[in-house]
């Protein structure tokens, strides 16, 4: 074979490899899929009441904000008391049930969906769960185009996925990408093992479906990770199996009831893995056991490493919390722990978590207890160590305060410990719920708190 023949062979080989590479890297054609599933995706228009902070921001001119912040108020200026927002949703049944995000319809006074034929229909909020960011809507009628759900366990990193939604209000926009990671937890959130993708999502995509190549819904688009407010290549979706578990409870009870074990947990790092003689960092370390909790009654100890949940290996704490969140109360589970370098199986009967999501009364009311006002706080009981540190026998710890809520407007902040309401001692979360249920509108309650070790009294105005 002469040199010219060799060169021709090389050229042919290079051309063949290039053709194969070009064919392999060709983008996935989702056009038929988009045409098939689009009718089941809707735009969501929401009317929400503006918070006091938002109203103040509208009242203060920008030039004054630069010098005085939002403290300058111009009383004579009239500003709107409501605002509009938008998002996406999709039908999960032919009789009018739709899935969307909690943050899309949170504090909504009116929700309207728009179908792909431009019809607009008022929707009712059946229920909403802040922890998982899932909300269930219902519209009147039948024979709606419902989507089918896929198996998230079969979804693999690197597989193509498609999102349809209404970014910035542009309805029925499709964007595609690949699965970047699974079981991703964000900023300490442990209730949802997010699906991470590089699908371009923007404000308005929230609540829309994430599809696999078969046209099955595998996720509910929830949020992006961004330093600018726009898409930066990191998008997160709620696995559809997690969302449908929430939907089932919202349909039956109008609220989500979660199980409670009563332990504080942390991941095992390299150093702890070596200390516990583990071949690699795995499992979930118990750092604290709540008194009188299911964990305490079952015999769990601080320092135990939970390695298996009902025979399923635990890689990290998020895995364990996901299993706990999806287990109904009053079930008995088997947990394998590592204690004193030996494996030990402990049975524990889970109870109901003290901070369940209360039921929705109707489409226009925010989440609230069955009686009494909505304070806008998340609470938990005090641990024995916390009681000893601040010198009390009981109380409730304020974990979070909703901006614009009654508690926030009365200057209650996260980290406060409430010990009394109207001279009634608050020792447990149940005491707190009962005391709040007795508060009347247009009154001011006396709330005794401990903040940074200092005792104080706050007037909580109930409106």
Image (cartoon, rainbow, N blue to C red):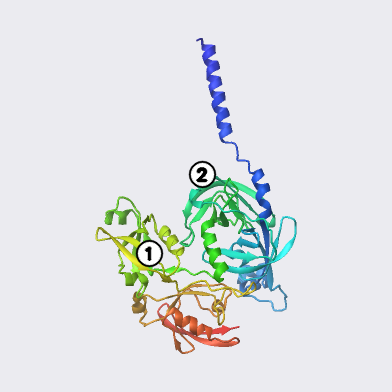
- Is residue 135 or residue 447 the one in the foreground? 135
Dividing the picture into quarters, in which one does residue 236 lie? bottom right
Query: Is residue 239 at least partly visible in the picture?
Result: no
Outermost right residue: 118
Q: Helix, strand or loop at disc 2? A: loop
Q: Horizontal placement of 142 versus 413: left or right?
A: right
- Is residue 292 or residue 138 the one in the foreground? 138
Mark 2 = which residue? 158
Outermost bottom residue: 423
Q: At 59% across and 62% down in the image, what residue appears? A: 101
Q: Say which quadrant the C terminus sits in.
A: bottom right
Query: Is residue 197 at least partly visible in the picture?
Result: yes
| Residue 301, image x, y percentages | 30, 67
| Residue 292, image x, y percentages | 35, 75
Q: Are marks 2 and 1 in contact (CB under 8 Å)?
A: no
* CA separation in Å, label 2 and label 1: 34 Å
**Relative to 429, is 12 above or below?**
above
Q: At 68% across and 71% down in the image, what residue appears? A: 82
Q: Helix, strand or loop at disc 1? A: strand
Mark 1 = which residue? 333
Q: Residues within 10 Å of mark 2 (few under 14, many from 20)?
A: few
| Residue 121, image x, y percentages | 72, 64
Q: At 63% across and 68% down in the image, what residue appears? A: 125
Q: Residues within 10 Å of mark 1 (few under 14, many from 20)?
A: some
**Relative to 109, is 334 above or below?**
above
Q: Horizontal placement of 380 versus 281: left or right?
A: right
Mark linked to residue 388: none
């Amino acid at each position: 074979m002469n040199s010219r023949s060799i060169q021709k062979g090389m050229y042919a080989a290079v051309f063949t490899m290039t053709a194969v590479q070009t064919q392999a890297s060709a983008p996935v054609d989702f056009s038929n899929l988009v045409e098939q599933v689009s009718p089941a995706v809707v735009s969501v228009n929401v009317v929400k009441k503006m918070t006091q902070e938002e109203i103040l921001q509208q009242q203060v001119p920008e030039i004054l904000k630069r010098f005085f912040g939002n403290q300058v108020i111009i009383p004579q200026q009239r500003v709107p008391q409501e605002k509009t927002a938008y998002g996406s949703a999709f039908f999960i049944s032919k009789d009018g049930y739709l899935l969307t995000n909690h943050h899309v319809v949170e504090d909504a006074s009116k929700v309207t969906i728009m179908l792909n034929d431009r019809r607009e229909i008022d929707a009712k909020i059946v229920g909403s769960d802040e922890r998982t960011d899932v909300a269930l809507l219902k519209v009147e009628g039948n024979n709606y185009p419902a989507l089918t759900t896929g198996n998230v366990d079969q979804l693999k990193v690197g597989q193509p996925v498609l999102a349809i939604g209404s970014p910035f209000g542009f309805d029925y926009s499709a964007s595609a990408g690949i699965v970047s990671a699974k079981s991703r937890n964000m900023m300490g959130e442990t209730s949802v093992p997010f699906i991470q993708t590089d699908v371009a999502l923007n404000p308005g995509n929230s609540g829309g479906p994430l599809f696999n190549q078969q046209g099955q819904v595998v996720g509910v688009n929830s949020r992006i990770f961004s330093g600018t407010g726009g898409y930066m290549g990191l998008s997160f979706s709620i696995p559809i199996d997690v969302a449908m578990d929430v939907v089932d409870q919202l349909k039956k009870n109008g609220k989500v009831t979660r199980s409670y074990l009563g332990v504080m947990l942390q991941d095992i790092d390299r150093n702890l893995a070596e200390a516990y003689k583990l071949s690699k960092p795995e499992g979930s370390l118990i750092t604290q056991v709540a008194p009188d909790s299911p964990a305490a009654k079952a015999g769990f100890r601080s320092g135990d490493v939970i390695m298996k949940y009902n025979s399923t290996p635990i890689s990290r704490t998020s895995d364990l919390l996901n299993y706990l969140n999806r287990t109904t109360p009053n079930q008995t589970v088997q947990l394998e722990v590592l204690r004193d370098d030996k494996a030990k199986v402990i049975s524990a009967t889970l109870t109901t978590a003290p901070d369940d999501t209360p039921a929705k009364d109707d489409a226009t009311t925010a989440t609230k207890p069955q009686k009494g006002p909505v304070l806008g706080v998340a609470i938990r009981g005090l641990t024995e160590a916390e009681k000893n540190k601040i010198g009390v026998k009981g109380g409730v710890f304020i974990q979070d305060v909703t901006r614009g809520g009654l508690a926030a407007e009365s200057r209650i902040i996260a980290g406060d410990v409430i010990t009394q309401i109207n001279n009634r001692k608050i020792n447990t979360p149940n005491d707190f719920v009962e005391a709040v249920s007795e508060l009347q509108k247009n009154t001011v309650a006396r709330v005794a708190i401990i903040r940074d070790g200092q005792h104080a009294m706050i007037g909580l105005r109930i409106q």
